[in-house]
Amino acid sequence: RKEVEQDPGPFNVPEGATVAFNCTYSNSASQSFFWYRQDCRKEPKLLMSVYSSGNEDGRFTAQLNRASQYISLLIRDSKLSDSATYLCVVGWDNYGQNFVFGPGTRLSVLP
Amino acid sequence: NAGVTQTPKFQVLKTGQSMTLQCAQDMNHNSMYWYRQDPGMGLRLIYYSASEGTTDKGEVPNGYNVSRLNKREFSLRLESAAPSQTSVYFCASRDGGSEKLFFGSGTQLSVL
């Protein structure tokens, strides 16, 4: 079983739609969780960290379910500019060398 | 702010050739990393340097060497390139007090 799994998509949604991605992880000792965004042929950039109680940043909401070992990302009111690949990242500590990247979920927001 | 700068952006090699990928950061970060990204797979850590003067192997170090030249620069060397090393390579850095990784713009490497 892969350490971090994501549905590769693509998710094709109309502008204004709400879309959600899930990511499952296998290491129950994982302590840190993130969503990164990667535009086509560009570098990944941190979108948001995921905290135990869940957290929100504008139109983006992240949730963590430790019991089922998954994290989710909800995007409300999708914009064309949200089209990208979303990478789930899980670490068993806060040191970068112990981060495991998922393969990513591709989102296309259509006009 | 330049952030993390990688060179070159593109490179084509023949099997057996050698090359060095350069990476420099201007954010005074202690930790630096080299990843490779292949289709359908997550970024995989090749080598990292937790601080100036130290380097350690990551998940996929075979066929690569690194040098942490100073606090700013972390280079990745392919001594004898193989087609399996065709990939996109990303350098990243991180401040010790933060979990956030800052990535360079990547190097597209093709080995024929």
Image (spheres, coloured by chain):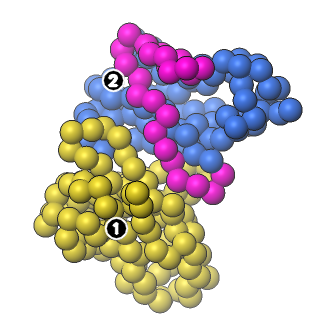
The tint chain B carries is: yellow
Amino acid found under the numbered disc labelled 1: Ala
Q: Residue at x 39, y 80 (%)?
A: B20
What is the quadrant of the C terminus of chain B in the image?
bottom right
Mark 2: which secondary structure? loop
Residue A73 at x, y percent in the picture: 56, 22
In three-dimensional space, the C-alpha distance between marks 2 and 1, rounded to whole angstroms, equals 35 Å
Measuring from the top left, give residue B51's x and y in whole percent: 16, 58
Residue A18 vertical position relative to residue B87 in the rendered view, above or below: above
Question: Do circles 2 and 1 both sit on a common chain?
Answer: no
Residue in the image at 51% along x and 61% along y: B105
Chain letter for the blue part? A
Residue A42 colored magenta?
yes
Task: Name the chain letter of the residue that bears numbered label 1.
Answer: B
Quarter-wise, where is residue A65 in the image? Answer: top left
Residue B22: horizontal and vertical position, in percent? 38, 74
Q: Amino acid at mark 2?
A: Ser
* Residue at the (59%, 82%) spot, across then down: B12
Evaluate whether residue B83 shows in this view. Answer: no
Q: Which residue is mark 2?
A: A28
Q: Hey, which residue is sitting farthest right in the picture?
A: A111
- Residue beneath disc 1: B24
Q: Which is nearer the eye, B61 or B11?
A: B11
Any part of residue A24 in sight? yes
The residue stretch that appears in magenta: A40-63
